[in-house]
Each structure stands twice: as C-alpha cells, then as structure tokens.
Amino acid sequence: MSGTLNAIRERIGELAATIEAPLQYLPTYESSEHSGRPHVEVTSDGQLHWVVCERGHEYERRSTLERDELLYWVFAAVTHEMASKFEVAHRIESEDFRRQLFAHQLELLRRLSPSWAARRVRELGPLLDEVGLQVD
C-alpha cells in the first residue's frame, strides 16, 4: 500500500474515531469486496478515487487530487449510514423520517468539519425546508 494511501487510511481512522463510526461503514483500500462497500484507490499519478463495486460491476467512481474532497465523500457516506441507523432507532411516527436523518448527519459532519456540514446543507438545499429543518 502506498504511503499516500496509508496516510489516508490513518486519517479516515482518526476521523471515524471522532464520531465512533462502525468499521463496517468505512471503505476498504486498494480493492473492492464487490459488496457495494466503497473502496479507496490511489493511482501512481496521485489521483484519489472513491469507487463503489458490487458483484463485479463498478457503479460509481469519483476522482480528485484533493485529499479533503476524498475525505468528504467518505464521511458524507459514513455519516449518512450512521444517521439512517439513528433515525430508525429514534423514529417519530408523525414526523418525516428525513428530518432526524438530516439533522443527525449534519451534527456528525459538524463534529468532523464545519465546512463539510455547510457543504451538505448546500447539497440538501430545499429538502431541508421540505422536512421543516432549520439549520444555522
């Protein structure tokens, strides 16, 4: 495993510990399990890749030269999984399930990086209004 990939793996581990992310939500490295679990690759030209494969088919590949961008992709997915589990365990039947899901994901992202939380707010845009979630 390359030094860059080792450094990324270490940083993902540090960030995951900050929010107590379950290991099964974290990506694998260099190669895919072909289970839909993402993996991270680093190519010799310095490209960082976020790849999702399942049953021998590649469904998604994002590439960047920016480490922070890759880390955002990783933790947008990780925090979404965590927030989904949280919402199911704390469901309020009279409320749109996305309200708690989005609120919890944004809280987790804020703990990792306020700029990541702000980015997610921009990505969710009108959905936040739709579910009645006010964000600061």
Image (cartoon, rainbow, N blue to C red):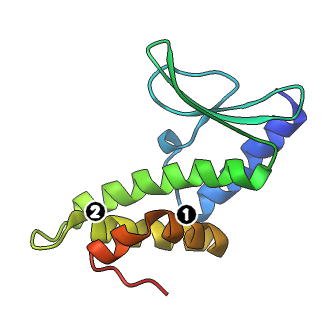
Q: Which residue is mark 1?
A: 19
Give the secondary structure at mark 1.
loop
What percent of the width, then of the height, locates residue 131?
Answer: 27, 73
What percent of the width, then of the height, locates residue 79?
Answer: 48, 57
Q: Which residue is mark 2?
A: 87
In this rendering, would 62 be left or right of 9?
A: left
In this rendering, would 52 be left or right of 49?
A: left
Residue that lies at the very extreme toward the front in this rendered image: 126
In this rendering, would 72 be left or right of 77?
A: right
Q: How many marks?
A: 2
User: Which amino acid type is marked by label 1?
Assistant: Ile
- Look at the picture and state if 31 lies above or below 98: above
User: Which amino acid type is marked by label 2?
Assistant: Glu
Q: Residue at x 34, y 64 (%)?
A: 101
Q: Residue at x 64, y 55 (%)?
A: 72
Near mark 1 (Cα within 10 A), the count class, few <14, some 14-19 or many ≥20, is some
- Look at the picture and state if 4 lies above or below 54: below
In this rendering, would 93 be left or right of 110?
A: left
